[in-house]
Image (spheres, rainbow, N blue to C red):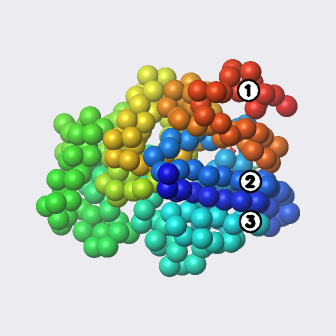
Amino acid sequence: MTAIIRAHDLAKSYANGKAIFSDIGLNIASRERVALIGSNGAGKSTLLKCIIGLLPSSGGEVVTLGESFRSSPSAAQLRRIRKQIGFVFQHHGLVSRQSVLTNVLQGKLGLPGGWRGWHHSIARQRWREEAMQALADVRLLGKAGARADALSGGQAQRVAIARALIRRPKLLIADEPAASLDPAAGHDVMRVFSELTQEHAITLVYTTHDMEHALDYSDRMIALKAGRIFFDRPTAQVTRADLKDVFDA
Ligand SMILES: Nc1ncnc2c1ncn2[C@@H]1O[C@H](COP(=O)(O)OP(=O)(O)OP(=O)(O)O)[C@@H](O)[C@H]1O
């Protein structure tokens, strides 16, 4: 299978000398759905940022989407990496006063000709169709004309997923995508991720503190503890005792 992310001996210390992790080896294949877990401050977000080149690492080597780099990617590599990635964060980051359709189209910003994604009135017809399809995929077609601030938290996060999907990414990075949602909306969002990434052959890497979300929607789990990979194994082989050990001091 094609590797989407490979890393070896990856280490990160901040400028204040604080070591976050070291000796990290990763090999994430195309189409895998990977849950990254660990206690608060274990370094999950930092690791995600290092492997996509948004933060410099302090040691080791990374190959992400075919771009090989130590510390940081070059500006050209970073552009190529970013074109192939979609992001979803804990906060949806929608523009509240704009329509849902315009928010989805803004996923095209940063891609060639992406400025036309600024507003639905200047977007290419083909993109508008893609955005409507993405809204249908997240079951929000009926909300295309609504203002983003009229949506519930779960709906807004599904729009954020649609906005990431119209980039046609190879890799979707989601940092605590369901953390601010109630249990039903949280499962709904995770189900949408899981189904759509499978359907569109997208590799999904997400962080979560919710072990149901980690167990139910991933093929593989990577646990960070004390600056190292504590385990990295198929989700079907992860036991409740393993999970308890990740969070025990
Ligand atoms: N800019 C920074 N300078 C120094 N230390 C930082 C910086 N950013 C993060 N840290 C520290 O790095 C450690 C890892 O943070 P990170 O956000 O990656 O953890 P996390 O596992 O994603 O945590 P959480 O689950 O709480 O989001 C934390 O101790 C944090 O305080």
Badge 2 marks a residue whose secondary structure is strand
Amino acid type assigned to the residue bearing label 3 in the image: Gly
> In the current view of this chain or complex, which residue is farthest to the left?
125
Report the disc number at residue 242. Answer: 1
**Location of mark 2 (residue):** 24
Please provide percent x and percent y for residue 98. 28, 52
Q: Earlier in the sequence, mark 1 or mark 3?
A: 3
Q: From what the image shows, is residue 217 above or below residue 137?
A: above
Amino acid type assigned to the residue bearing label 1 in the image: Asp
Amino acid type assigned to the residue bearing label 2 in the image: Ile
Disc 1 to disc 3, C-alpha distance = 27 Å
Tag 1 near tag 2, CB within 8 Å: no
Whether label 1 lies within 8 Å of ligand 1 gets the answer no
Q: Earlier in the sequence, mark 1 or mark 2?
A: 2
Mark 2 neighbour class, 10 Å CA radius: few under 14, some 14 to 19, many 20 or more: some
Of 177 and 226, which appears nearest the observer? Answer: 226
Q: From what the image shows, is residue 25 above or below residue 215?
A: below
